[in-house]
Image (cartoon, rainbow, N blue to C red):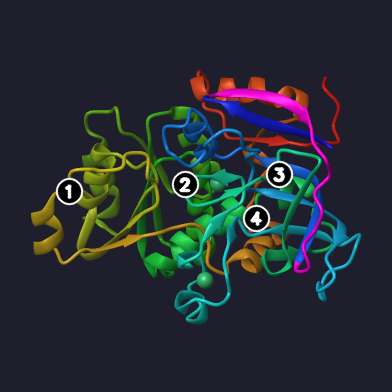
Amino acid sequence: MKALELIGPSKFEVVEKPAPKPNANEVVIRVKACGICGSDIHGMDGSSGRRIAPIVMGHEASGVIEAVGAEVSNLSVGDRVTFDSTVFCNQCDYCNHGRFNLCDDRQVMGVSCEEFHRDGAFADMVVCPEHICHRLPEGLSFEEAAFAEPVGVALHAVNRSGASSTETAVVIGSGLIGLLIIQALRTIGCSEIIAIDLDDSRLELAIELGATMGVNSQDSDAVERAVKRLDGKADHCFEVVGATPTVNLAIGLAKKGGSVTLVGNLAPEVQLPLQKVVTGELTLYGSCAINGEYPDALDAIVSGDISVKPLITASVSIDEAADWFAKLKVAEKPYLKVLVCPESTAS
Ligand SMILES: [Zn+2]
Ligand SMILES: [Zn+2]
């Protein structure tokens, strides 16, 4: 089978590999679409320690079951599926308490680090355990289904925050995940959803998708405009960048007793305005990956509560993918999601 392998820091090669064979509890999936994630872009130079070459990346995929292991009982060849980016053990204390994303033996598809190596789905085929798979609803396209993972990430962040209808929210960062969080907040009925970003085209899209106001943080009066619109500050702030200035902005825009959900994790460390958090009794939530939100994510895509088609920048073949990794890295345009579709042929 054909695979796009990361062979060194930000260096790719399209290679021929033997088709994976499933262990007893595993399935082999013929990949139809797999999204390129921000973590792939930031990690491909090796700096995050999570993409140590050689590795086939790719953890946001959809496809069709090609083969099943001897003990697989709920899935059959031909089933249309997506899979959880987190490979959880189903046995540790965290798994037993339903916190699968915190599994002590957590692995991630398409990631290689010191503890594990798991090839992902920028390939004709990928192998994973049966218990992390989810069947696709009828009629859902593979391209849309590849968004189940990022939509699940957004739903998990909103679930962590405890946001509910009539409450107000600020979302800092209108990239892919930010735009999905905005849609999730709109679906639950938040009365104000303020999008903050540096890029006006993203802010326009944010408003199309449900933000009640877009604020460019380069404007000198950005914060004042947000505060004015909110008539104070927000019940819930979402930080979807992961850097000191944006964490500060999120904490500064949360009302006393409010919450700040930290989703972005670009910088390993940030400075925190401690006194604001303490004296305002803010609740800070970390939000990592997905914990059981896959069925809701698939439902939201099918129902149109969360629309993902406007977020597709390009669908490309495996041969074209390396060029797109380079383009996404440079980010000369505000690209959103690029999908690698192994069965498409280079244009
Ligand atoms: Zn991802
Ligand atoms: Zn576990």
Is the distance from the Cβ of mark 2 to the nearest ligand 2 atom less than 8 Å? Answer: no
- The reply to whether discs 4 and 3 touch (Cβ–Cβ < 8 Å) is no
**Residue 46: x and y, percent?**
47, 32
> Closer to the N terminus: mark 4 or mark 3?
3
Q: CA distance from mark 4 to mark 3?
A: 14 Å
Which residue is at the front of the view, 9 or 280? 9
Q: Which residues are magenta?
A: 10-25
Image coordinates of residue 273 in percent, x first then y, are 13, 49
Residue at image location 21% in from the left, 44% down from the top: 248
Task: Indicate which disc, 2 or 1, sits on the residue closer to the N terminus.
Answer: 2
- 335 sits left or right of 307 in the view: left
282 sits to left or right of 186: left
Sequence-first tag of 1 and 4: 4
Q: Which residue is mark 4?
A: 148
Q: Amino acid at mark 4?
A: Ala
Measuring from the top left, give residue 305's x and y in whole percent: 63, 59
Q: What secondary structure is the stretch in magenta mostly built from?
A: loop
| Residue 16, placed above or below residue 33 | above
In the rendered view, tell whether residue 132 sits above or below residue 126: below
Q: Closest to the observer: 315 or 63?
A: 63
Binning the other alpha carbons within 10 Å of mark 1 as few (below 14), some (14 to 19) or many (20 upward) gives: few
State how far apart marks 1 and 3 are (Cα): 37 Å
Magenta-drawn stretch contains 23: yes
Relative vertical location of residue 177 with respect to residue 215 in this rendering, above or below: below
Where in the figure is residue 128, as x and y percent of width and height?
71, 58
Q: Which residue is mark 1?
A: 272
Query: Is residue 331 visible in this depiction of the protein?
Result: no
The amino acid type of the residue labelled 1 equals Leu
Circle 4 sits in a helix, a strand or a loop, which is it?
helix
Q: Nearest to the eye among marks 2 and 4: give it.
A: 2
- Label 2 with label 1: CB-CB less than 8 Å: no
The residue to which callout 2 is attached is 114
